[in-house]
Amino acid sequence: MKNIIKLLTLLFITVLLFTTYLAFVYDKESKAIEAKLSEDGVQRVDVIVDSYSFEPNQIIAVVNKPVEITLRSVTTVVPHNFNLNSPEAGLNIDQDISPGEEVKVTFTPTKIGIFEFYCDKKGLFGSHQKKGMKGILEVK
Ligand SMILES: [Cu+2]
């Protein structure tokens, strides 16, 4: 009986450590990235497009300055897209991204706020957005 309790305690501690580790890794991956302001006045950022994620998934940009996002697909089969639709803030993007393709989208955010982007494709088992293909643009 005592051995079982010991075993369960050990198992509990292992699970606890593992989930803490996962939370730490996940937190690192979802770190916000500031779009880098170039000499030509354009704020640029690269985003890796995979099934089913955008990396980084938090982009920070400054209001009323052009933003250029390079979307780099690393998939071999699954097509994705990049939707960023808040027309009231100057955001009106629906860009298809073929497997392995690299495309650029440019826009100028005209309002401060937090705006969601996502992939609106759907597979057999649900939408890509629900599987994690989403992120936020924070305009400061
Ligand atoms: Cu997708």
Image: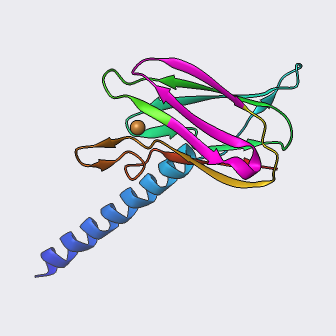
Q: Position of residue 129 (x, y in %)?
A: 43, 49
Start-end of magenta stretch: 82-106
The chosen color scheme is: rainbow
* Point 27% across, 67% down: residue: 10
Q: Please, is residue 55 above or below residue 105 in the view? A: below
Query: Does 115 appear in magenta?
Result: no
Q: Position of residue 118 (x, y in %)?
A: 51, 45
Q: Position of residue 97 (x, y in %)?
A: 47, 26
Query: Does 86 appear in magenta?
Result: yes
* Point 56% across, 20% down: residue: 103
Quarter of the displayed picture in which ligand 1 can be seen:
top left
Q: Quadrant of the N terminus?
A: bottom left
Q: Please, is residue 67 above or below residue 52 in the view? A: above
* Point 44% across, 44% down: residue: 120
Q: Quadrant of residue 56?
A: top right
* Dominant secondary structure of the residues highlighted in magenta in the image: strand
Q: Along the line of sight, which residue is nearer the eye, 88 or 24?
A: 88
Q: Residue furthest bottom?
A: 1
Q: Residue furthest left?
A: 1
Drawn side of residue 121 relative to residue 84, left or right = left
* Point 69% across, 48% down: residue: 87
Drawn side of residue 127 relative to residue 124, left or right = right
Total numbered badges shown on the rendered structure: 0
Q: Position of residue 85 (x, y in %)?
A: 62, 46
